[in-house]
Image: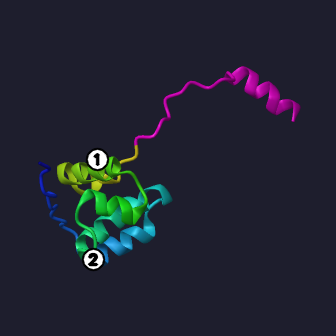
Amino acid sequence: MARPAKPIEIKENLTELKQLHKQAAPHLKIRVQMLILSKLGKASGKYALADALGVNHNSIQNWRSRYQKGGLKKLLEDKRGGNRAAVIDSKTDKAILSKL
């Protein structure tokens, strides 16, 4: 038997969330939208939120657990890539720039 949806307590008020939604990067807006829908009570379970936002229910579960562990700071943390070494070394890059 499945467990009932665990409600999350959202500390921020609705106006703060709407303001944050306007300022957030495009790929993070959907996470703030999840909090807004939860705060309004329009969707509470992960499946209902996933349907409303058009994302996978596992994403909702991950975002909710991140919010519960560290609040907005943890929810809006962006850890996408950035550690890949450059294909063209700096010497070659300078040579290309000088020819352009």
Q: Nearer the viewer, residue 1 or 84?
A: 1
Q: Which residues are magenta?
A: 79-100
From this viewpoint, which residue is outermost toward the right? Answer: 99
Looking at the image, which residue is at 48% across and 35% down? 81
> Residue 5: horizontal and vertical position, in percent?
16, 58
Left or right relative to 11: residue 59: right
Q: Are marks 1 and 2 in contact (CB under 8 Å)?
A: no
Callout 2: SS: helix
Q: Which mark is residue 62?
A: 1
Residue 9: name its quadrant: bottom left
Q: Nearer the viewer, mark 1 or mark 2?
A: 1
Q: With respect to residue 28, does 77 lie above or below? A: above
Q: Residue at x 31, y 53 (%)?
A: 60
The part of the image, by quadrant, that contains residue 80 is: top left
Relative image position of residue 49 (x, y in whole percent): 32, 62
80 magenta-colored: yes
Residue that numbered label 2 is attached to:
14
- Is residue 15 positioned above or below 49 on the image? below
Q: Which residue of the protein is positioned furthest toward the bottom in this rendering?
A: 15
